Image: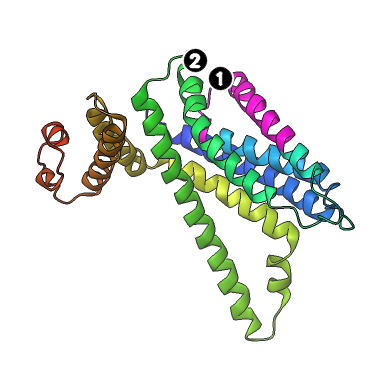
Amino acid sequence: MRLSLSDNQTTRAVLAAVGLVQGFVYFLAYEFWPDDPSAAAFAVAPVFFVSVAVLIIDLSWTGSDVKRLAALTAVPTTVFTILAFWVWRQIPGSEAPYRFDDSRIPSLIFGAAMAIYVLLPFLQTYQKSGRREYPYDSLFRHSWNNLYIVGIALLLTGAFWSIIFLWYELFKLIDVTFFEDVFTSAPFVSISLTTVFGYGMALGRESERVTSIASCTANSHASASSHRTSVPGEFAIHWAAAAVGYRACFGGTVVTHRIHDPLLERRLPRRDW
């Protein structure tokens, strides 16, 4: 369903405001971050909570059914926050003989990111329909959409920071350091980047190019998944179909005789774009 101009503006305002709150929490955590690794769990908990909650809201916001979205956000966010708090509390202090045993932190972050990536399509599907039905094409489309939307938000955030960096570097050439002091301060960095990122998420959600690419890729993937084969063969067919659909969505010629799986060739006929 396409959003109207007013709906798009509302989404931009909501996601930017959510990013603003996220940045404010980041700034407070930075200001009051304790030196003791174990005590840092009390600062990590709100950071983890707001990070997971904002990501779910940014990608699942529909403009309606706010109570349902709040429930879908609160449950997984609370679980991940408790897990992060528990992990950080286990980190030994600076005086402990095993004080460098903090490799569990990147493991937690990577594992949580993968878990959220898998969980998000289910949350998005339920938020949109309100039914406990999870069609495969919907899950796959959301999984691709999420990657593209986050990628656009990161590109916009990077472009924003590049302009800011160029701005204060040019003023430094004439010995004006005021802008560098402002733009590199903790409040500005934490609040502005998260706000721009939230706005970028809204722009990514509005892009028909992004959603059409994800839909085309999902349809190609789903057409190949309708065949029953061995597990390794099915895995190969799925990703070959996704690659073909991805290439076809961007344009170019898809020549299926280069794919040496006759089953996949019958399902994906030659297309000349």
Residue at the image position 28 percent from the left and 40 percent from the top:
242
251 part of magenta stretch: no
Q: CA distance from mark 2 to mark 1?
A: 9 Å
Which residues are drawn in magenta?
A: 59-83
Establish if 258 lies above or below 164.
Answer: above
Query: Most prominent secondary structure in the magenta stretch?
Result: helix
Of the numbered discs 2 and 1, the one sitting upstream in the chain is: 1
Identified by mark 2, the residue type is Gly
Residues at circles 2 and 1 in contact by the CB criterion of under 8 Å: yes
Residue at the image position 50 percent from the left and 44 percent from the top:
201
Label 2 sits on a secondary structure element that is loop
Q: Position of residue 170 (x, y in %)?
A: 59, 80
Residue at the image position 69 percent from the left and 73 percent from the top:
180
Establish if 45 lies above or below 62.
Answer: below
- For the residue carrying disc 2, how many other residues have a C-alpha within 10 Å: few (<14), some (14-19), or many (20+)? few
Establish if 182 lies above or below 17.
Answer: below
Q: Position of residue 258 (x, y in %)?
A: 13, 48
